[in-house]
Amino acid sequence: MNQTLYPEFGILLVDDEASFLRSLSITLERNGGITHIYRCCDSRNVMNIIQQESIGLVLLDLTMPHISGQQLLQTMTEQHPDISVIIISGLNHVESAVKCLQQGAFDYFVKTSEEGRLIEGIKRAIRMQEMRRENQALGQRILNNNLESPHVFDPIIGCSKQMRAVFQYLESVAPSNQPLLICGESGTGKELLAKAAHQLSNRAGPLVSVNVAGLDDNVFADTLFGHQRGAFTGAERSRAGLIEEAAGGTLFLDEIGDLSMASQVKLLRLLQEGEYYPLGSDRPKRIRARVIVATHQELQQRQAEGSFRRDLYYRLCTHQIHIPPLRQRKEDIPLLLEHFLAQAAQEMSKSVPSYPPELPVLLSNYHFPGNIRELRALIFDALSQHRSHLLSMEVFRQVIGQNIEITEHQTEQLNNSPPHFNAEEPLPTLAQMDRLLVEEALRRANNNQSLAARLLGISQPALSKRLKKSRPVE
C-alpha cells in the first residue's frame, strides 16, 4: 500500500482505553482523511515515542494511571513547545479546561463532543502546525540563502534575486497539503512552477493538470469528479474524475480565474469539506490530492467586479506565489537567450550560432508583454531565418522596433507618474536634464551609442554631437 500519509507529521493518540483509541483512529481516518497516526495506551511511553517519531500533534486524555495527562501536558509544553496538544477528556469541567489551556493546550474537547466539531478542531490544529513548520523552514532558507534541491528548478531558467526568493518559498510550502495559488502574467512559467512544487513534495501519486478556462459547469464537474454509469444520457459506463486520478499526488488547475461562478461553488465545497460526489452517486469520496491553481488574472479585481468568490480566494491563497514578469528580472534575459538558442538549434538540427553583443542589451530594453513565451518565439523565429555565422538582429528589431518605441504600459506610467522634483530645491536646467537623460540612456544601453540613440529617439550622430559638447555642470 503506497499511500501518502496526512499530515506530514505524526499525530499521537494517548488514552488508557484501547477501544477508544481504535474508535478515534477510525473516525479520524474515515471522516477526516487523517492517516499519520500513532497510538499509545501507556502514558509512561509517551515521551519515548515523541523522541523517536516526528510528532507534531498529541491528542491527550487527562485521567490515566501511572502519569496523568496534566503532568504530561506540563512536560511536553516545557520540553517540546513546538508540539501542539489537544485535550480529549471524559471530564466536562470548566476548571480543568481553563487550567489546561493556561498550561499551553491548543484546545479542549469532551469525549462526548460532536464528532464533526472534534474533527474540525483537530484539522485546525494541523493547519496551524503546518504553517508554523513552513514559516520556520522558510526563515531558515532565507537566512542560509540556499536551496536544498536546486536541480528541481533547472527547467526554470533564472538567476535573479526575485526568482531565487520564489524557489526558496516553494521549497518550504511544497510538502504542505494546503492549496497553492500561483499568480503571474501569461508566459511567466506558472506550469513549470507547479511541476516543481509537485516534484519537491515527493508525493507518490502523479501530477494531473487541466486548463479549466472555458469549461461549463457540467463539463467541469464531470472532468474533476467523474460519473457513475447512467448518470446522464450517454454515460454507458462509470468514469473516474481527475481528482481520483491524482490520488496521492497533485491536481493542477490552470487559469482558475476564468472559472464560472457555479463551478467556483463546487471547488469551494471540495476544498472546505475535503470530499466530493461523482455525478450520479450519493456516496462521497475523499480527495487525496494536493490542489495547486494558477491564474494570470488579478483575483482581487475579479472579486471587486463580482466575478470571483471571496471565500474561494481565501481558501486558495493559504500559500501564494507571484512570478515576476520578465521586465522585472532583466538579468535573466542573457541566460534565457542562451537556453532558447540551444533549444532551437537542437530542434532545427542546426549549430548554436553566436550573436551580436548588443542583442542582450536590446532585449533588456524591451517591455516583453508576452514575457518568456514571447522571448522564446522571437529566438526560434530568428534562428529559423539564420543563414550566416552571426545571428541577425533583424527579427528582433522588427518586433521591438527600430527606435524601441515606448510601449503603451510605459506611456501610461509616464502619464500617471510625472517626474518628481524636490520642491525645496531649484529646478534643473534643460541642459542638466539633457545630460542626465543621455547618461541614463547610455547606462541602459551598456554604453552602446547606437542603442542609446534609439532609446532617446534621436540619431546616432546627434547623440555623438551631444557627447562632444557635454561638460560638467558648474
Image (cartoon, rainbow, N blue to C red):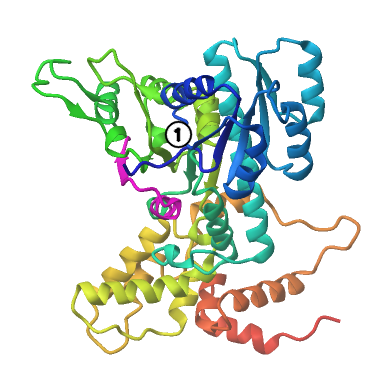
Rendered location of residue 314, percent (x, y):
55, 30
Outermost residue, right side = 424
Left or right of 196? Residue 167 is: right
Q: Is residue 312 above or below residue 246?
A: above
Q: Residues within 10 Å of mark 1 (few under 14, many from 20)?
A: some
Given residues 36 and 208, the one toward you in this image is 36
Rendered location of residue 281, percent (x, y):
25, 15
Q: Classify the position of the N terminus by image quarter.
A: top left
Left or right of 3? Residue 345 is: left
Point 82% across, 26% down: residue: 102
User: Which picture quadrant has residue 145?
Assistant: bottom right
- In the picture of the structure, the residue carrying the numbered disc 1 is 35
Residue 207 part of the magenta-drawn span: yes
Given residues 454 and 137, the one toward you in this image is 137
Q: Is residue 55 visible?
A: yes
Left or right of 424? Residue 396 is: left
Q: Is residue 318 visible?
A: no
Rendered location of residue 365, percent (x, y):
51, 68
Residue 181 part of the magenta-drawn span: no
Rendered location of residue 471, percent (x, y):
76, 86
User: Which picture quadrant has residue 46?
Assistant: top right
Left or right of 163? Residue 419 is: right
Task: Kindly identify the amino acid type of the residue bearing the numbered disc 1.
Answer: Thr
Q: Is residue 237 above or below residue 258?
A: above
Given residues 337 and 474, the one toward you in this image is 337
Residue extent of the magenta highlight: 193-212
Given residues 363 and 178, the one toward you in this image is 178
Question: In this figure, what is the number of numbered marks?
Answer: 1
- For mark 1, give the secondary structure: loop
Outermost residue, front side = 66
Point 32% across, 75% down: residue: 341
